[in-house]
Image (tube, rainbow, N blue to C red):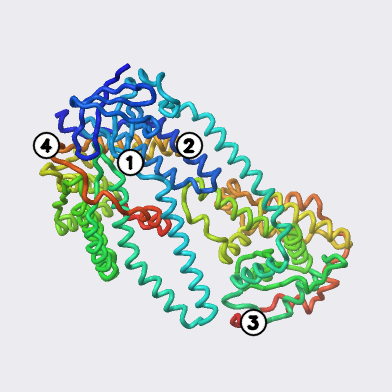
Amino acid sequence: MKISCRYSDGQTAKIYEGELSYISGHFVLIYNNKEIMWTSSNVSFEKLGADEICLHHQEECIYVYKNEWENLQSFLPPKFFNNNERKYIPYFVVGIISLALIFHFGIPALSNSIAQIIPSSFEKKLGSSVAEKFTIDSMCSNDQRVEVVKDILREFLHSNENVSDYHLFISDLKDVNAFAAPGNTIIITKGLIDFVDDPDELAGVVGHELQHLRGKHHLRKIIKYGFTSLFWSTAIGSLTGYIVVDPELMKTLVVRGYDTQEEKESDLMALNFLREKNYRTDGLQKFMKKLAKENDSKANKILEVVSSHPSNEQRVEYLAKLSTNKGKSFNSIINKERWIKFKSKCETKKAP
Amino acid sequence: MEERRSFHFKGEGTDLFVVILKNIFFTLITLGIYFPFAKTNLRKFFWNNLELKGEKFQYIGTGMEILKGYLIAGAVLFGYQVIVGIVTSILPEATIFVVLAGALALLFIVPTLIFGSHRYLLTRTQYRGIKFGVNPEGKKQITIEFLKAVILSPLTLGLYNIAFFFIIRKVLLNHSYYGNEKITYTGDTSEFFWKNFIGAILSYITLGIYFPWLMAWNLNYHSQHTVIQGNKLSIDVTGQDLLILYLKNILFLTLSLGLATPWIAILNMTFYVDRLSLEGEIDFDKISKSPYEKGGELSDGFSDVLEVDIGL
């Protein structure tokens, strides 16, 4: 069986017309009244587009059109088969979807397991670097504020816990917010202090942040971000995703909040604690209601649709069902005088 | 007329789709190690489907070469970070000097990579069994031009960049060879600069509408000034053609949520290649092996890691 081909000797750009056959393990080419013979084991096969192949031997190449090649193919070893890669489309699609599913469900599960085994000494280091990012410009020198938060926090602690295990910071950010950061760190903004009307509201917020710390939501989020970033960077072939999660990025992640399930879990755990200690549980709900009113803009409503974070309205809704004004008030711990001091203007000093 | 349209692109969207799927799949399961091979697969697809006068181009680069570039670049960057770390902890005041030394090194590494990447691509491109090549002497000129740009670009508020990219193209092409045949670029820097300077202002004033006309002028200018064996390239593209192409790209990409990317890539490639032609005939009998058919082994991977890509 002979097929027509073209031949390049790799020394000049001249292309010769020729005839190719396959005889007992050898390719035999006749061109320009010459004959050359290549042992098939020394020949490599390369597809050139969809309609042509090149048989390489060192710098030489024999070009054959696909339709001609098919005539010869039945005599050849499998490595010279002109596979149609289109038939692999379904396998690749299923493979990629499976990988995406594994990463979608596997990453959160893996992040959760890793978060549980991270040593507390390492977590503390992370926490102080994140806290630094919040307090780098200035921090409150009015220790009374931190003492008030400590007194509230003490009520939430288990008997084997100590308030000194927690690091409390007041940030001079004007946004109404509180953050749980690695290393048992709780950061409360100046904006939140101005915003809360009574110690019960503050207690609701502190209890909520404490549950984020207990559930290691902050670590889960940072680890999940690291894996997801690695996954997508790998998928799109960008090397930037391999950059380590640095304190600035961790700060951003902490500020961005948690997903619906984690927020709800923290809300409900905080309410349970208050209930167990016989405190009134409507502080957090009152706080969220005010916040919802404050953020009641069209833009926020549109953002809520695409956000993984629960909306303030949704939180107010389920908190209202579970909260009650029965029980003790935190006013019994934070008297009026201390509360006024807590709400007083923060004297700032440069961070050390 | 048919003879003038001597370039042809034969790739199909479905085949490119397979290549992309395969690349994504293997890159994911190997956690990125396959990426250099994926890049090579894509290049092979585009090169091996490009024809000039009935003969296909061939891409003969390998993923392993690019991977080696990645590994060496990673090792160099890691080594530098280690040095910075050691100096910072032992002698903090000296950190600034290490950082400055790094910045100074970059002034010479970047032009080397610009030249090396071009050299890598050309020496891995073959047509009719003959490789392209690049005369290594061009590297010195690229370095000088790069250092000039580092000074002049800030002084001219970035305007010098228009001339810089043009000069780089000119130097690279004027040091390029197909086999033993030198490629020449005859464009004039000041003519190109003023046309692009005015074009940029017009694009700004017309809210981008003039941009396709400027790009069409550039394509025509570059091809008409690229000469091999006395034969000029030419491309038959107008601003209106480009405007329609850009609109098609936006429309198809948006409607398909990006899934039509392979078919859009083919549409674009076919658009440019089918309008490109070589005026006259090349005497292939006179063309033999390039004296500069090797080099640039590590540059491609290294450029990726340092993100050096001036998009010529």
The secondary structure type at the circle numbered 2 is helix
Q: Residue A347: give its label.
A: 3
Q: Residue at x 80, y 56 (%)?
A: A269
Residue drawn at x 36%, y 30% is A39
Taking the image as drawn, is residue A349 in sight? yes
The answer for which chain carries disc 4 is: B
Q: Is A52 situated above or below B92? A: above
Quadrant for the N terminus of chain B in the image: top left
Where is residue B93 drawn, in percent x and y? 48, 83
Which of pointers 1 and 4 lies earlier in the amino acid sequence? 1
The residue labelled by disc 2 is: B21
Question: Who comes first in sequence, dot 2 or dot 1?
Answer: 2
Label drawn at residue B280: 4
Q: Is residue B289 above or below residue B305?
A: above
**Mark 4 vs mark 2: which is more N-terminal?**
2
Looking at the rendered structure, the secondary structure element under dot 1 is strand
Provide residue A101's location: percent of width, then percent of height: 62, 40
What is the distance, in whole Å, between disc 3 and disc 1 at their CAs?
68 Å
Chain bearing mark 2: B
Looking at the picture, do discs 3 and 4 lie on one chain?
Answer: no
Circle 3/circle 1 CB separation < 8 Å: no
Q: Nearer the viewer, mark 1 or mark 4?
A: 1
Alpha carbon separation for disc pair 4 and 2: 40 Å
C-alpha span from label 3 to label 4: 82 Å
Real-space Cα separation, disc 3 to disc 2, in angstroms: 59 Å
Q: Nearer the viewer, residue B201 or B176?
A: B176
Closer to viewer: mark 3 or mark 4 = 4
Q: Which mark is residue B59?
A: 1
